[in-house]
Amino acid sequence: MPFPPTPRILYHKNPLDQVICQLRFPPILRIEASIPAAFQDAIRDAFSGFAETSEIKLEVPPEVSDQVPPEILRQLVRLPSAKHYEFASEDGKWKVNLTRAFLSLSTADYQRWEFFKEKLVAPLAALTDVYSPQHFIRIGLRYIDVIRRSKLNLLKVPWRELLAPHISGVLGHPSVGENVHKLEAVYEVTLDDPSGTVRIITKFVKAKEDGEICFMIDSDFFTDQKTPIEQAVGRLDYFNTRASRLIRWCITDRLHLAMEPEPL
């Protein structure tokens, strides 16, 4: 059991910066062959905004990429562009992305899992009804937490008092920790279900507004196992439960209480 069970709670001072769910499937060329009008009609009540972009990729041999001027690189072989269709809520806080290989839902306004799952219902049903993917080849649920001490009235509190020792690492050293200016660590952990994995990135990031040093915990839960369409939501439920356990495993009681937890 990688992360011990913990009571479910709601943080009133939620550190979540973004939550992303991605469902990958074998490429469906029909998604790029014509505009996704039927898909849009099915989700337009919740996602009225629309934008279309094309991602153009350059294929350059690695042995020459560092030796060729940028203006020449732009004239080298180009791979076919990939179309991205974005559908956004009226306030822009929720976004659905559709490509020939995946469907995703993301938000910067996450409150609780039930609300997120409710937002996923229409896009997932539209994908199934309009394009009929056979199965998913990757299911991912990613939580990006950014802990900003000033918003929690903890600006003068050292990181070693806020992060569990197995996460804080060198930050836990009393004379060195507060002098660390750059930090990044990457871990991959197998979950209880052997087909599930979480990739954890911990690092310092700067707040855009004032440059405050914040601590980011980026946890990407995923499975690359072929999954039937009807089992996708169950896999996401499983990842959500493990995500709640992980964040509590990463922080101390002091930080937990500062984020104002409420039992659910």
Image: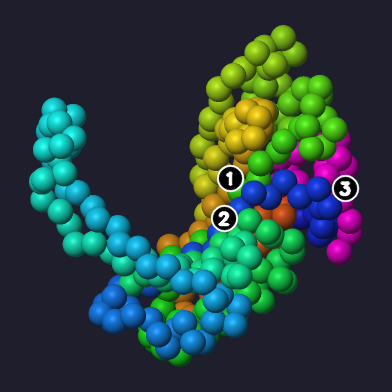
Pointer 1 with pointer 2, Cβ within 8 A: yes
Pointer 3 with pointer 1, Cβ within 8 A: no
User: Residue 112 appears in which quarter of the rendering?
Assistant: bottom right
Horizontal relation, residue 156 to residue 27: left or right: right
Residue 195 is at least partly visible in this image: no
Residue located at (66% from left, 55% from top): 243
How far apart are labels 3 and 2 at the CA level?
Answer: 23 Å
Q: Residues within 10 Å of mark 1 (few under 14, many from 20)?
A: many
Circle 2 residue: 142
Task: Indicate the secondary structure of the residue bearing disc 3.
Answer: loop
Q: From which residue to which does the magenta span run?
A: 247-264
Horizontal relation, residue 236 to residue 103: left or right: right
User: Residue 218 appears in which quarter of the rendering?
Assistant: top right
Circle 3 residue: 260
Q: Earlier in the sequence, mark 3 or mark 2?
A: 2
Horizontal relation, residue 160 to residue 25: left or right: right
Horizontal relation, residue 240 to residue 261: left or right: left
- Which image quadrant: the C terminus? bottom right
Task: Indicate the secondary structure of the residue bearing disc 2.
Answer: strand
Q: Give the percent coordinates (x, y) of residue 206.
A: 60, 31
Disc 1 marks a residue whose amino acid type is Asp
Circle 1 residue: 218
Which of 212 and 141 lies nearest the eye of the viewer?
212
